[in-house]
Amino acid sequence: MDALQGVSGQNILMESNAAGNGSTLKIDNAAGWGSSVSNFGATDTIKITTPVTWDHVNYTPFNNGTQSLFSFTSNGAPIANLLLNGSQYNMTNMGFSGAIVNGQEVTTVTTAVPKDVSRVSFTDPIAGIVGQETASPYHDPNVPFLEWNYFWNSADGVAMTGSVPNMFLHGGPGDDAIAVTSGQNVIDGGPGSNFLTGTTAASGGRDQFFLDGRGGSVTYSTLVNFHPGDQVTIFGFTAGTSTLTWDGTGGATGFEGATAHSELNGTGTGVNASLTFTGIDLPTAAAHFQLQTGTTGGTPFLLISYT
C-alpha cells in the first residue's frame, strides 16, 4: 500500500499474500494521519514521513487497552501518531529507525509481534482480487459457540471460505459462494443467488444458514452438506401470507435436491425465495424437516430444522 492519507475512524488492514509475505504501508504527511492499523506483524513494515526528525517516541495504551498509540515528538512537540489495533504492542517489541530522504525524515517501523493468521480466503471475480483476511473475534453471549466473524463489505459477488471452526460468515448483496470447514458456524448468504456449503455430518459440525428475502429482494440459495442438527432461516417469510411449495428436485446440475419455493408477499405476487437442499430427496425432507414460523426483532421468518 502506498502513500495513503488516513481518515479519522478508518482502519487499514495489513494482509499477507499467498506466499506469506507481509505488507508495506507508507504514510505521507503523517501529521494528518488519522487511521488505525490492524494486523501489523513481524513480516510487515510501516514507513512514516515527517517534515522534521523526531527525538522521542511515546507509547500509550489507548481506547481501554484495545489499541496501542505511538506518538512521535520533536523537542516535546507532537509531529506524528501511529495507532495500532491490539494491546500486544509496546516499546520492547517495536523498532523505529529513521533516515533523511529528499529532505524529509522517513521512519521505518517494525515489530517482533507475530503476524495474525488468515482465517478467511476470498475471490472477487469482478474486481479480479484474490486475498485473505484474519476475521474479527466474535463475542456474543447469545451465541457462545461463535469465535470469529467476517462480513463481505462489497456489492461484488464473492467466493469465500472459512478455514477455522466456529465462524460467522456474511455475504453481500451479490451472488456469493460461501463455505466453512469445521465446527459450528453461521452462514448468511443475504439476497441474491448463493451457494452455501456447510460442514459434513462426518466431521461432527453443525451449521445455521440464513437467507434474506426482505425489502423486495429475490434470493435463491443452494445448501450443500445440510444434515441432522443443521438449520436454515428465511427472513421475510410471514405466516398466513407467504406461500411454500416443494419440488422433488431442483438446483444446478450436480447439486440437485428437494427445493422449496416461496412467494413471500403472498399468492400471485411471484416466487422471490427458493432453497435447494443438495442431495436430499423429497421423502427425506418430509420425514426429517421441521418447520417453524415466528418473528424476531419485528422481522418474520421461517425456520427449517433437520431432525
Image: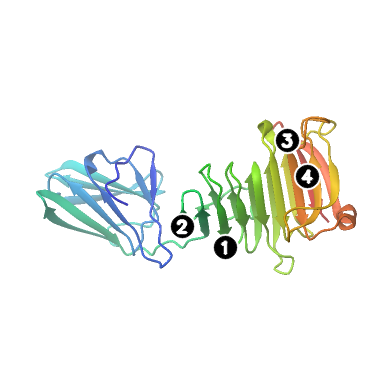
Q: In the image, what residue type sits under mark 4?
A: Leu
What is the spatial separation of the Cα atoms under label 2 and label 4, in whole angstroms?
Answer: 33 Å
Mark 1 lies on a secondary structure that is loop
What is the spatial separation of the Cα atoms under label 4 and label 3, in whole angstroms?
Answer: 11 Å
Crowd rating for badge 2 (residues with CA inside 10 Å; few <14, some 14–19, many 20+): some
Mark 3 lies on a secondary structure that is loop
Name the spot of residue 19 as percent of width and height, x first. Answer: 41, 68
Question: Quadrant location of residue 288?
Answer: bottom right
Residues 263 and 32: in front is 263
Mark closest to the chain's N terminus, 2 or 4: 2
Name the spot of residue 116 as percent of width and height, x first. Answer: 43, 61
Q: In the image, what residue type sits under mark 1?
A: Val
Q: In the image, what residue type sits under mark 3?
A: Gly
Q: What numbered label is drawn on residue 225?
A: none
Mark nearest the camera among 1 and 2 is: 2
Q: Which residue is mark 3?
A: 236
Q: Which residue is mark 1?
A: 164
Mark closest to the chain's N terminus, 1 or 2: 2
Name the spot of residue 15 as percent of width and height, x first. Answer: 40, 57
Mark nearest the camera among 2 and 3 is: 2
Name the spot of residue 84 as percent of width and height, x first. Answer: 35, 50
Q: Which residue is mark 2?
A: 131
